[in-house]
Amino acid sequence: MLKNCFFDFILNNYKPNIDYNIYTAKSDGEIVASLLLLYFKNTVEYFVPATRSDHKKNQPMSAVIHTALTEAMRNNYKKWSWGGTPVGHKNLHRFKSRFGADDHFYCSYTLVFDNSIKNETSETLLKSFPDFYSYPFHELNGKKKNDI
């Protein structure tokens, strides 16, 4: 399954606590939030945060990030990369800024291996690749009016 390939690759090729770490928050024994961190030199990359929607009101990701940031500082990491936040994601931007994130301009580059993807609709891409960025909707030939 495509969604698991990335995580399988990380688990099979990288060393836990050296190259990556996974932080979780639990409620009544169930995982309600999880965060993958990638480590390189003196930088921690915040990667793949996930919170169960029925627990968002309790803000378990804030606790996960606080723990991860504290451990990163103890382990002498100097930089914490929040990754990009697309324009328009105001809640995510506010969340990161409350941890002291700085704003920087960034670009996303897409390399297309199969041009047939351009003939799809955004609906098809979202269904085929849930939770993944695949291609800019405004550049699709099969785009839908509501997607632009």
Image (spheres, rainbow, N blue to C red):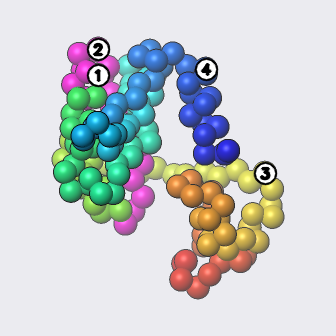
Disc 1 residue type? Ala
Q: Which residue is mark 1?
A: 72
Q: Position of residue 107 (x, y in %)?
A: 51, 52
First reached walking from the N terminus: tag 4 or tag 3: 4
Q: Residue at x 74, y 67 (%)?
A: 118
User: Are the residues tagged 2 and 3 within 8 Å (C-beta)?
Assistant: no
Category of crowding for the residue at label 1, using alpha-carbon neighbours closer than 10 angstroms: few (below 14), some (14–19), many (at least 20): some
Which quadrant: the N terminus?
top right
Is residue 6 visible in the rendered structure shown here? yes
Measured Cα–Cα span from mark 2 to mark 1? 5 Å
First reached walking from the N terminus: tag 1 or tag 4: 4
First reached walking from the N terminus: tag 4 or tag 2: 4
Measured Cα–Cα span from mark 4 to mark 2? 22 Å
Measured Cα–Cα span from mark 4 to mark 3? 25 Å
Q: Quadrant of residue 5?
A: top right
Closer mark to the observer between disc 4 and disc 3: 4
Tag shown at residue 75: 2
**The residue tagged with tag 4: helix, strand or loop?**
helix
First reached walking from the N terminus: tag 3 or tag 1: 1
Vertical placement of 80 versus 1: above or below? above
Q: Nearer the viewer, residue 107 or 53?
A: 53
Vertical placement of 72 versus 83: above or below? above
**The residue tagged with tag 3: helix, strand or loop?**
loop
Q: Which residues are magenta?
A: 69-88
Q: Is residue 87 magenta?
A: yes
Q: Which residue is mark 4?
A: 13
Disc 4 residue type? Asn
Disc 2 residue type? Asn
User: Are the residues tagged 2 and 1 within 8 Å (C-beta)?
Assistant: yes
